[in-house]
Image (cartoon, helix red, strand yellow):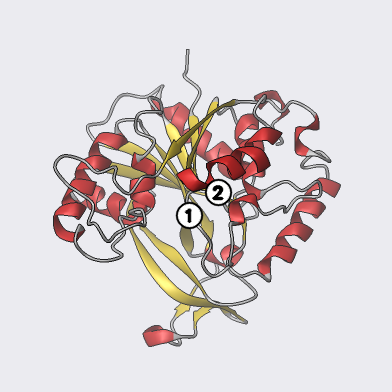
Amino acid sequence: MKTPPTLLILAAGMGSRYGGLKQIEPMGPEGETILEYSVFDAIRSGFGKVVFVIRRDFDQAFRDNVLSRFTSTIDIECVYQDPDDLPGDFRKPTDRSKPWGTGHAVLAARKAIHEPFAVINADDFYGAETFKVLARFCADWQTSEQDQKVRAGLAAFPLASTLSAHGAVSRGICSTDAEGRLLSIREQGHIRIAQEGAMIVEGPDKGKMFSPEQLVSMNAFAFESGFFKHLETAFEHFLSEQVEVAGSEFFLPEACTRLMREGNLRIDVARSDASWLGVTYGADAEAVRSALKMFTDQGLYPQGLWQGNPSAADEQD
């Protein structure tokens, strides 16, 4: 019998440009947060558990304002991203208070997850199709022969569907081989909408063009559980070079790139044509609310997500 995958939601960060805790900002017609739609879609795609990575000082507000709305629908666990949680003999510098980035956030869940799992951001709306893609990755690994490399998957989006009408954004530009396996994720900043598609209009790459169809990573990954062991090793390499560097961060895409380069990780890329929504700037919030209302009016989501009891059988085709 297949083990249902787990969804890991990274909810420990604050939106610096947005100016607040986006994770608990009401967005849906009945005041739902963006992450509630992710949990709802994950349940319909067959995920059996949700693990949230949160900050300790965010715990009570998160439980009261978010978790209380759907605790009876799926198994839930919270883990903390603690800056002092370092491997081996490494110690946090005394003047550092911030955590160590998204790779470190994933590691915070290593004792809570023992099955294939997906990772997403708390403040991005990924759409139902994305969770079907991630669930398929996890299911396929349980019916195929084990590879020497740890297997992973990335649900990637066309660049044009991830831009903001209110300012430039940074995106992880994906390069793949002929078999659709990830070669690299390169962070590219200052991307704005242009008539011809997406164009870099600021910074040293001014005038550089990207196709609207260029696939980008929005941190929607799936991993075998063995990934944690390799991620911890990559974190140790990072700390050996960066532990004393003020503000240094161990980012998940960079860790994945290192593990691929070392031959320890294989990432297959699948395109998602779901409607991605996010709040990079405060002005983006109204567009997100309008889109979620439209999806509800179209019957893609019920009026009031948790008035019923969603299950995999309710999955929308």
Looking at marks 2 and 1 on the same chain, the residue that comes earlier in the sequence is marked by 1
203 lies above or below 304: below
- Residue toward you, 236 or 160: 236
Query: Could you tell me which quadrant the C terminus lies in?
Result: top right
**Residue 195 placement: quadrant:** bottom right
> Is the residue marked by circle 1 packed among few (<14), some (14-19), or many (20+) residues within 10 Å?
many
Can residue 178 be seen in the rendering of this structure? no
Going 23% across and 52% down the picture, which residue do you hit? 92
Q: Which x, y percent locates residue 179? A: 36, 48
- Mark 1 residue element: loop
Going 21% across and 41% down the picture, which residue do you hit? 87
Residue lying at the far top in this picture: please name it. 1
Q: Which x, y percent locates residue 20? A: 59, 62
| Residue 13, numbered circle | 1
- Residue toward you, 281 or 56: 56
Q: Which x, y percent locates residue 68? A: 67, 34
- Mark 2 residue element: loop
| Residue 122, numbered circle | 2
**Residue 207 placement: quadrant:** bottom left
| Residue 316, numbered circle | none
75 sits to left or right of 53: right
315 sits to left or right of 297: left
244 sits to left or right of 155: left
Contact check, label 2 and label 1, Cβ < 8 Å: yes
> Is the residue marked by circle 2 packed among few (<14), some (14-19), or many (20+) residues within 10 Å?
many
58 lies above or below 288: above
Task: Give the mark toward the camera: 2 or 1.
Answer: 1
The amino acid type found where label 1 is placed reads Gly
The amino acid type found where label 2 is placed reads Ala
